[in-house]
Image (tube, rainbow, N blue to C red):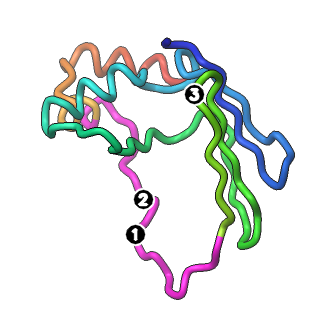
């Protein structure tokens, strides 16, 4: 299934709604295929894909739940880290060069993809 509803809740309130087929830059199928070129995926592996637009910070004590239609719901309580996670969450800008190098995407396709990004 390529277009499932993904919802995020913070303390029981829906704060995000998106669709796996329309709102992610790369489909799940693409991400899995790309990873499988480099590593062997095993049962129980967890793939973190990021979220659709409009994610927001949360505070320690908040209960965050992510639900994907037909798959299930994952719920966790946010805790405060004992130390600052320097560099965690940093990611490169989405540029044609990043897509070309990191994802082995053809240069013209990468240029097109970046040009169509809102």
Residues under numbered marks 1 and 2 in contact, where contact means CB atoms less than 8 Å apart = yes
**In the image, is residue 82 above or below residue 55?**
below
SS at mark 2 in the image = loop
Residues under numbered marks 3 and 1 in contact, where contact means CB atoms less than 8 Å apart = no
Residues under numbered marks 2 and 3 in contact, where contact means CB atoms less than 8 Å apart = no
Which span is picked out in magenta?
Answer: 79-98
Residue 93 painted magenta = yes
Residue 16 painted magenta = no
- At 21% from the left edge and 22% from the top edge, which residue is drawn? 105
Cα–Cα span, label 2 and label 3:
29 Å
> In which quarter of the view is residue 27 placed?
top left
- At 62% from the left edge and 22% from the top edge, which residue is drawn? 70
Cα–Cα span, label 1 and label 2:
6 Å
Cα–Cα span, label 3 and label 1:
31 Å
- At 39% from the left edge and 37% from the top edge, which residue is drawn? 94
Q: Which residue is mark 3?
A: 71
Instruction: Classify residue 97 as left or right of residue 47.
Output: left
Name the outermost residue toward the right. 13
SS at mark 1 in the image = loop
Q: Nearer the viewer, residue 6 or 84?
A: 6
Q: Which mark is residue 90?
A: 2
């Amino acid at each position: 299934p390529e277009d499932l509803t993904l919802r995020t809740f913070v303390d029981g309130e829906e704060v995000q709604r998106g669709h796996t087929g329309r709102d992610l830059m790369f489909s799940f199928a693409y991400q899995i295929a790309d990873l499988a070129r480099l590593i062997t995926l095993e049962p129980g592996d967890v793939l973190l894909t990021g979220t659709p637009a409009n994610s927001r910070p949360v505070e320690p004590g908040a209960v965050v739940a992510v639900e994907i239609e037909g798959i299930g719901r994952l719920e966790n309580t946010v805790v405060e880290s004992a130390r600052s996670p320097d560099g965690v969450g940093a990611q490169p800008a989405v540029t044609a060069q990043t897509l070309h190098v990191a994802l082995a995407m053809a240069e013209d396709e990468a240029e097109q993809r970046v040009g169509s990004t809102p």
